[in-house]
Image (tube, helix red, strand yellow):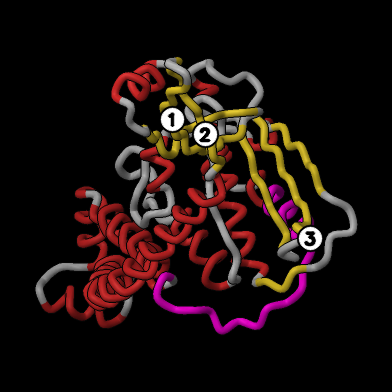
Amino acid sequence: MERVIQSMQTREVLSDPRQIRRKDGETYYEDITIYPLIANGVEGAVIRIDDVTEQVRLQEMMIQSEKMLSVGGLAAGMAHEINNPLAGIMQTASVVADRLTRNLPANERAAAEVGTSMEVIHAFMHARGIPKMLNRIQESGSRAAKIVTNMLSFARKSDAILSSYSLAELLDQSIDLASSDYDLKKQYDFKQIEIIRKYEKNLPLVPCEKSKIQQVFLNILRNGAEAMQEMKGEGKVENPKFILTLTLEEETEMLRIEIEDNGPGMNEATRNRVFEPFFTTKPVGKGTGLGLSVSYFIITETHNGKMNVESTPGAGA
């Protein structure tokens, strides 16, 4: 009412773009325009409300696509610059481990030449925890190499031949994979999450890369499960659940996949950055921030699809 009164007092047209309205768990955007009117000495106003939800989502998708295009070139350059020294680190750590921990003839000869033995060297190394240090170097190198591989995926399109699959079957298989994921089971039992399936019948097969699409499903399921686990630990959600929906959009002849959870949701700032590479809300060391970025690239670039997120704080995603 304050804006209406202001418009009437100043006799100016006032606009409030992109106002958020929530209905049935969905988020809508509206442009509200107030026109002051005076007729026969009576003041009033006309309020016009335009639903701009689709325009806003299209703008967000275009902005995201532009971001990913610019990031692609940057990521490729960074990945190549990192790859060479990283390979040197991992190879050197492997050679050091071989020369200090294995009883190879060359190692034994070198030890004898300096007046010692491999047994003495082994005893010293174990006493100082050196084998564990070398293992940590190799594990850290492997983790960094995986990040580099993900970065490179932004800059190159896959040449794999697409095959036709049932997305319902791929989604169910991904749930089975998530249920047996050791890293997830260390924190909680994925099987305790309720899975509600809303699959439209007689859906057509979709040409896709099976492993890539399952990677996308796993990334989304893993993120949702981790978020719901945090809320469960805080006592804010008793029954974590996923609602999986598969439908055919007849106008576009595209299959629509919705993966909904009842986790903590996201504020607008987080939602706008969720597909950015290396953006994460997890503590340092808990995530690379590449999972959803790679997923976005797989869907939009490799499969010519669309991917977006709808979420509000406290209402899941």
- With 309 as the anchor, is 82 left or right in this view? left
Q: Amino acid at mark 1?
A: Ile
Q: Position of residue 132 (x, y in %)?
A: 30, 52
At 73% from the left edge and 60% from the top edge, which residue is drawn?
Answer: 255
In reply to whether residue 165 is colored magenta, the answer given is: yes
User: Which residue is labeled 3 in the image?
Assistant: 250
Circle nearer the N terminus (3, 2): 2
| Mark seen at residue 48 | 2
Whether residue 103 is visible, yes or no, is no
Q: Quadrant of the C terminus?
A: top right
Mark 3 vs mark 2: give the one in front.
Answer: 2
Whether residue 101 is visible, yes or no, is yes
Circle 1 packing at 10 Å, graded few (<14), some (14-19), many (20+), is: many
Q: Amino acid at mark 3?
A: Glu
Q: How far is disc 3 from disc 1 in space, using C-alphas?
A: 37 Å
What SS does tag 1 mark?
strand
At 47% from the left edge and 54% from the top edge, which residue is drawn?
Answer: 292
User: Which residue is labeled 1 in the image?
Assistant: 34
Quadrant of the image occupied by residue 125: bottom left
Q: Position of residue 272 (x, y in %)?
A: 40, 46
- With 66 as the anchor, is 191 left or right in this view? right
